Amino acid sequence: MIIPIILSSTKALSSLDTFDTLETFEECKQAISDAGKLAFDNNLILSCHPGPYTVLGSSNSKVVSNSIKEILAHKSIGLLLKEKAPNLQFHINFHVGNKFDVDSAKRFCNAFNSLPDDAKTMIIIENDDKKNGWSIKKLYDYIHNSTGIPLTFDYHHSNFSREKNISAQEEFLIAKQTWKNKNILQEVQIGRAHVW
């Protein structure tokens, strides 16, 4: 059985309370819950990726506030997915945002610590796809060590953000360390920038 779930705009998800006005709200919740059970029964791991405007480390408080709303909306979907499959592995995977700097890391960690625990346990972060962005090493040193957030190693992104003295294999191994004691499988992404 295929259960289609289309989430076309996370802005529409910014508060699940707004879904209560839809006639099919209960049907949507049921379908999402069924999809989580189906994924769990078939040993699948589910992950979502909020958009580029989810920037917990922003110096703009409105951006941070909107980012928190975005994360909480994804968390709500995650909770529905886990309703019939509490052990389903579900992640909210995103970037720290901003270019690398220590102040951005501090702001990110402060905003992360303000989130509810059930949202924190779903969050994972990945390395950037640009120079001067967040490499796995920087994420490990400035974010993971303060928050315990697992790191997603993205091989394609590593080609852009990795420090010159660290190999992709070393970055992978650094990220792998962050998943120990989490009782979940490591997420790794391998992608290409161009389609044939």
Image: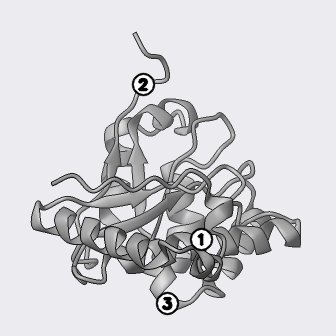
Q: Quadrant of residue 50?
A: bottom right
Up-down relation of residue 119 to residue 9 (above or below): below
State the residue at coordinates (53%, 74%).
23
Q: Residues within 10 Å of mark 3 (few under 14, many from 20)?
A: few
Q: Residues within 10 Å of mark 1 (few under 14, many from 20)?
A: many
Q: Secondary structure at mark 3?
A: helix
State the residue at coordinates (56%, 50%).
8
Q: Quadrant of residue 189?
A: top left
Q: Which residue position is annotated with label 3?
A: 117
Determine whether, in the image, residue 7 is placed left or right of residue 38.
right
State the residue at coordinates (39%, 36%).
155
Mark number for residue 71?
Answer: 1
Quadrant where the N terminus is found in the figure: bottom left
Q: Nearer the viewer, mark 1 or mark 2?
A: 1
Q: Viewer-proximal residue, 163 or 85? A: 85
Mark closest to the chain's N terminus, 1 or 2:
1
Measure the C-alpha gap from mark 1 to mark 2. Answer: 26 Å
Up-down relation of residue 67 to residue 129 (above or below): below
Q: Secondary structure at mark 1?
A: helix
- As drawn, the residue found furthest toward the top would be 196
- Residue 46: horizontal and vertical position, in percent? 32, 60
Type of the residue with mark 3: Asp
Type of the residue with mark 2: Arg
Contact flag, marks 1 and 2 (Cβ < 8 Å): no
Q: Viewer-proximal residue, 9 or 111? A: 9
Determine whether, in the image, residue 191 is placed left or right of residue 137.
left
- Residue 144: horizontal and vertical position, in percent? 50, 70
